[in-house]
């Protein structure tokens, strides 16, 4: 497969047209674009907003058109438009991004520590810092120390190169250490390899990188190592940024009212942490077709397959336009395939409705029988965004409901040569869930408020409340697991589930989870933020020994770094 990718990239570069880098996930851009999408969609629609990360060129084109129009905007929205223009300056023509330099060298552009802009070549280099320090009440310090750099370059306005690297040391709140770092599937939330550091800390590199180009004007091609996200919500039931980054090849066709995306991913299979060794690889493929029906309405269809073969890709799945389920059946139905549907509808210049529906397995005969068959696996998301609440400028509200039935995203086990059960085709990567962090057999309500005062547009206050109920699996005294459908890392078939029939949503050991996240940020220079955080998380279980509470507070600074959101 690697030779095919190399030839594909080399051929594509020869035909390349203008192409931009992509905006990192969980940055200011996404909140700003969301607001403009809802408020001005009938004038300047932002189609296909579920396809993330966003292309910088498209963001710049929208912001520049909006800035030069006669649309009247409030002070905070004007500041937000200027933020987009500065942040994507290599694609801006009519807005001056020149800045009085520091020592005649640094920050000649407001958004670039160092930059070069000569014929056929544009280069931007920025430092990356994410440092915060605080305490967990009744416990020990929590901290993050991240430092590194980000570089992006454009050659001939055809080829884009991007790299990001930071060295990181952290100590997480106790619930993350207990459930993730020390849990049954040891992992560093959202990241890959890590080493132990001092007292319950972790030391790791965070690296991202890709090459991107445009073919025949309408097709973007990207090959790299990064995270992906499909959807308009806080969560995604299709593919989210919850897990570690992975190696991918992505093509994106954007023409007329259509956006068609294909992703081929190489990931790390489920494993037990131990001595350094070569980890088994697994493969997954995804299609997402989005259609802009009207200026205010997008609808989409999703398809994904996780392969059952370790260290082996199936060439049939390289076909970018085909129904994956038919291929999977033709191969003997060995793989784990899902399909899904999503939509986004803006209305009244204040509201956006969005949602996703995913089907892992669905048998209408069993549904009509109402017998609780374990194989009816599906999930639902429904959300609402309300901007300028009660006509208060820049006061925004988001409500989201997610629910997933037992055993969704999981798959049957496969034995290795030694007879050990392997779970390869579940929707996981590096011991982390690829979609929702709670796995399956849960319901969740997310409520988020964001306020950017008109008179202090550099200040941002956000409050997030999450309430979830999980029907967790139970560990028995003899070490065996009662599999109720929450743990997607466990193999699932009629022999391994607790009950083949009689299953119910939220069955098992009830975990009631509450999560509160309050953040106050002040942007004192472009992409330089002072941050104060207050977090609370409680888990109440029907098994008292599993109860836990955690409250923490920290102060920090964030420079050219994405916001870290680990709310589960």
Image (cartoon, rainbow, N blue to C red):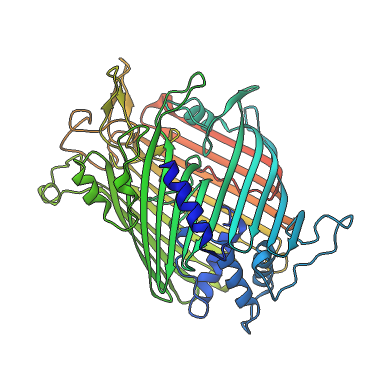
Q: Residue 142: image x %, image y %?
A: 64, 33
Q: Is residue 161 above or below residue 18?
A: above
Q: Residue 69: image x %, image y %?
A: 62, 82
Q: Residue at x 39, y 30 (%)?
A: 270
Q: Is residue 473 above or below residue 409?
A: above
Residue 529 appears anywhere in the view: no
The residue lying furthest to the top in this view is 478
Q: Quadrant of residue 204?
A: top right
The residue lying furthest to the right in this view is 103
Please give left or right for residue 308 compared with residue 158 in the image: left
Along the line of sight, which residue is nearer the eye, 128 or 276? 276
Q: Is residue 63 above or below residue 200?
A: below
Please give left or right for residue 260 compared with residue 386 in the image: left
Label count reads 0
Along the line of sight, which residue is nearer the eye, 299 or 512? 299
Q: Quadrant of residue 193?
A: top right
Please give left or right for residue 432 compared with residue 486 in the image: right
Q: Residue 389: image x %, image y %?
A: 54, 68
Q: Residue 179: image x %, image y %?
A: 47, 30
Residue 196 appears anywhere in the view: yes
Quadrant in the picture for the N terminus: top left
Along the line of sight, which residue is nearer the eye, 133 or 329? 329
């Amino acid at each position: 497969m690697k030779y095919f990718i190399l030839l594909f990239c080399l051929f594509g570069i020869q035909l390349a047209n203008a192409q931009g880098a992509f905006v990192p996930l969980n940055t200011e851009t996404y909140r700003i674009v969301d607001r403009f999408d809802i408020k001005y969609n009938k004038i300047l629609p932002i189609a296909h907003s579920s396809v993330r990360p966003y292309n910088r060129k498209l963001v710049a084109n929208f912001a520049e058109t909006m800035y030069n129009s006669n649309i009247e905007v409030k002070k905070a929205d004007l500041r937000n438009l200027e933020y987009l223009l500065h942040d994507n300056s290599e694609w801006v023509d009519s807005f001056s991004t020149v800045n009085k330099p520091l020592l005649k060298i640094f920050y000649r552009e407001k958004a670039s520590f160092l930059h070069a802009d000569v014929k056929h070549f544009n280069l931007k280099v920025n430092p990356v810092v994410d440092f915060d320090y605080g305490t967990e009440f009744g416990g020990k310090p929590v901290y993050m120390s991240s430092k590194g750099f980000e570089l992006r370059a454009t050659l001939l306005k055809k080829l884009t190169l991007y790299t990001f690297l930071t060295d990181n040391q952290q100590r997480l709140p106790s619930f993350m250490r207990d459930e993730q770092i020390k849990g049954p599937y040891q992992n560093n939330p959202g990241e890959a390899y890590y080493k132990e550091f001092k007292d319950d800390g972790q030391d790791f590199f965070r690296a991202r990188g890709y090459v991107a180009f445009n073919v025949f004007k309408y097709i973007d091609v990207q090959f790299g190592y990064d995270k992906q996200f499909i959807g308009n919500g806080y969560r995604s039931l299709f593919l989210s940024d919850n897990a570690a980054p992975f190696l991918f090849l992505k093509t994106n066709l954007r023409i007329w009212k259509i956006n068609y995306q294909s992703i081929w991913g190489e990931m790390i299979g489920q494993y037990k942490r131990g001595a350094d060794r070569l980890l088994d690889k697994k493969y997954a493929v995804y299609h997402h077709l989005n259609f802009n029906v009207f200026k205010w309405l997008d609808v989409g269809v999703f398809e994904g397959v996780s392969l059952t073969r370790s260290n082996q890709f199936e060439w049939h799945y390289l076909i970018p336009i085909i129904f994956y389920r038919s291929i999977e059946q033709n191969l003997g139905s060995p793989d784990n395939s899902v399909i899904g549907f999503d939509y986004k509808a803006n209305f009244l210049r204040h509201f956006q409705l969005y949602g996703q529906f995913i089907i892992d397995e669905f048998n209408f005969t069993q549904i009509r029988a109402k017998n609780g068959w374990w194989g009816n696996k599906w999930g639902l998301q429904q959300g609402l965004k309300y901007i300028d609440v009660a006509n208060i400028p820049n006061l925004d509200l988001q409500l989201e409901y997610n629910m997933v039935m037992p055993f969704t995203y999981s798959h049957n086990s496969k034995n290795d040569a030694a007879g050990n059960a392997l779970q390869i085709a579940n929707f996981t990567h590096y011991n982390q869930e690829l979609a929702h962090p709670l796995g399956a057999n849960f319901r969740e309500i997310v409520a988020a408020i964001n306020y950017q005062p008109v008179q202090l547009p550099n200040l941002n206050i956000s409050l997030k409340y999450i309430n979830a109920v999980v029907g967790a699996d139970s560990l028995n005294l003899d070490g065996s697991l009662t599999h109720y459908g929450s743990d997607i890392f466990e193999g699932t078939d009629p022999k391994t589930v607790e009950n083949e029939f009689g299953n119910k949503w939220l069955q098992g050991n009830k975990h009631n989870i509450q999560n509160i996240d309050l953040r106050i940020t002040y942007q004192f220079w472009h992409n330089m933020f002072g941050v104060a955080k207050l977090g609370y998380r409680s888990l109440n279980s029907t098994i008292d020994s599993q109860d836990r509470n955690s409250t923490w507070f920290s102060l920090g600074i964030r420079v050219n770094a994405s916001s870290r959101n680990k709310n589960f």
